[in-house]
Amino acid sequence: MFKLLKVILLVLILVIVYVVVTEISSSKYIYPEYHIELYKIEVVDSKSILIQDKISLIPVKYNGTLDFDTISEADRKIVFINYMLPAIVIERDRLMDMVHHIEFIENGMINKRPLKISDLTFFKEMMQKYDASSIKDLKMRLLPHPVSLVLAQASLESGWGTSKVFSRANNPFGIIAPPGDEKGRKFKNLISQTELYVKTYSSVNQSVEHYFFFIAKMTSYEKFRKKRWERGSSSDLVKLLKSYHETNEYTTLIESIIKKNDFEKYDNISINKDYFGYKKNYLQLIRSYFEDYF
């Protein structure tokens, strides 16, 4: 009887070893976990804002608000750029990772490779969230546009951080709240003397995330997304943003801000490697195995 138990235990161990080895050898079919270690800073004044390198960015998450009206005009632009830049680059990289994840799933479908439940769930959720009609359409909606264009829009719409919509609602892009939106806030347009309801956000990071989602969902930006998919530059894309603002000179103003401030130098900025990485570990493999087979 004892000998039989030993044989059963040995067989069980061999089965477990086989499963683990098989899963590890197939780890290339598991999409690695994307990870950014955010450096959090409590905002006290303009000196709290880090001056970022144009090549390697420290992914800062600023807590609190900053009154840009109290900053001298000579310093305001520099502070605003460095305040907005981390949120824009962090979201750009998150969206690029999502595009890569969708491409990973698409490649699995093409090669008839069994997909993990977590991948299938992610794919289904993204298709529904972005109202995508196909995998290509989803990738086109997710693909982010150049940092220079996003930064220029934030600069213009917020008056380099001085607008009340930005200071009170964390809304640097002037995004309007739809009727009935609980997070909408009323502001008065001093030019037209009309009341506007705009979106409010808990942080500038949340506002940047919603800005990209807004561009991805609206049918009026379909041509913009197509040109973006074709890797159009900021100057190419800005011509397709006429519907973003009622001002006829909007695209001209955006182009001027990009050129005057040399914003295109930020288009190739990357997150500092000490804060960024992909995780592919044994716990992920084991978790994935049990999700699929148990």
Image (cartoon, helix red, strand yellow):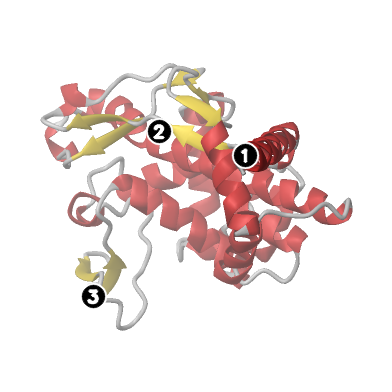
Q: Which residue is mark 2?
A: 85
| Marks 3 & 1, CB-CB < 8 Å contact | no
Residue at the image position 22 percent from the left and 64 percent from the top: 190
Judging depth in this view, the residue of 90 and 247 nearest the camera is 90
Residue at the image position 42 percent from the left and 57 percent from the top: 210
Could you say whether the residue bearing mark 3 is in a helix, strand or loop? strand
Q: Which residue is mark 1?
A: 9
Residue at the image position 52 percent from the left and 37 percent from the top: 283
Q: Which residue is mark 3?
A: 195
Tell me if I can see residue 136 in this picture.
yes
**Image quadrant where residue 282 sits:** top right
- Residue 45: x and y in percent read 12, 29
Instruction: Determine crowd level at label 1: few under 14, some 14-19, many 20+ residues with C-alpha closer than 10 A.
Output: few
Horizontal side, residue 271 vs residue 134: left or right? left
Horizontal side, residue 187 vs residue 278: left or right? left
Instruction: Determine crowd level at label 2: few under 14, some 14-19, many 20+ residues with C-alpha closer than 10 A.
Output: many
Q: CA distance from mark 2 to mark 3?
A: 30 Å
